[in-house]
């Protein structure tokens, strides 16, 4: 059995990054309607990883005390805590 350790669980919404159609159908739709999803894969990955890496970077920043304080129990909008 492994010893207990702190863990962070997050439920991010990556946003709308694909059309959820087969590639050929999506390509036709994009060409016909000049359609592009609102965000790309890079932005979606940032939405998922920022809550994990931002506290780590803050802990390593010059002048920091080295402690990592992840955000939990809150709603993030544009990478900042926001009201529900």
Image (tube, grey):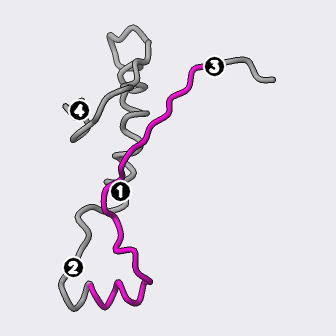
* Position of residue 11 measured from the top left corner of the image (x, y, whole percent): 43, 41
Tell whether position 10 is magenta: yes
Q: Which residue is mark 4?
A: 80
On residue 35, which mark appears? 2
Please tell me which residue lies in front, 79 or 9: 9
Q: Residue at x 24, y 89 (%)?
A: 31
Q: Which residues are magenta?
A: 5-29
Q: CA distance from mark 1 to mark 3?
A: 30 Å
Callout in the foreground (1, 4): 4
Mark 2 vs 4: CB contact within 8 A = no
Q: CA distance from mark 1 to mark 2?
A: 18 Å
Q: CA distance from mark 4 to mark 3?
A: 26 Å
**Mark 3 neighbour density, 10 Å: few (under 14) some (14–19) many (20 or more):** few
- Can you tell which quarter of the image residue 70 is in? top left
On residue 5, which mark appears? 3
Q: Is residue 56 above or below residue 76?
A: above
């Amino acid at each position: 059995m492994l010893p207990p350790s702190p863990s962070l669980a997050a439920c991010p919404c990556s946003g709308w990054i694909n059309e959820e159609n087969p590639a050929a159908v999506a390509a036709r739709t994009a060409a016909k309607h000049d359609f592009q999803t609102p965000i790309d894969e890079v932005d979606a990955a940032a939405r998922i990883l920022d809550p994990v890496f931002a506290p780590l970077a803050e802990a390593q920043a010059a002048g920091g005390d080295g402690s990592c304080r992840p955000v939990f129990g809150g709603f993030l909008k544009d990478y900042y805590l926001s009201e529900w």
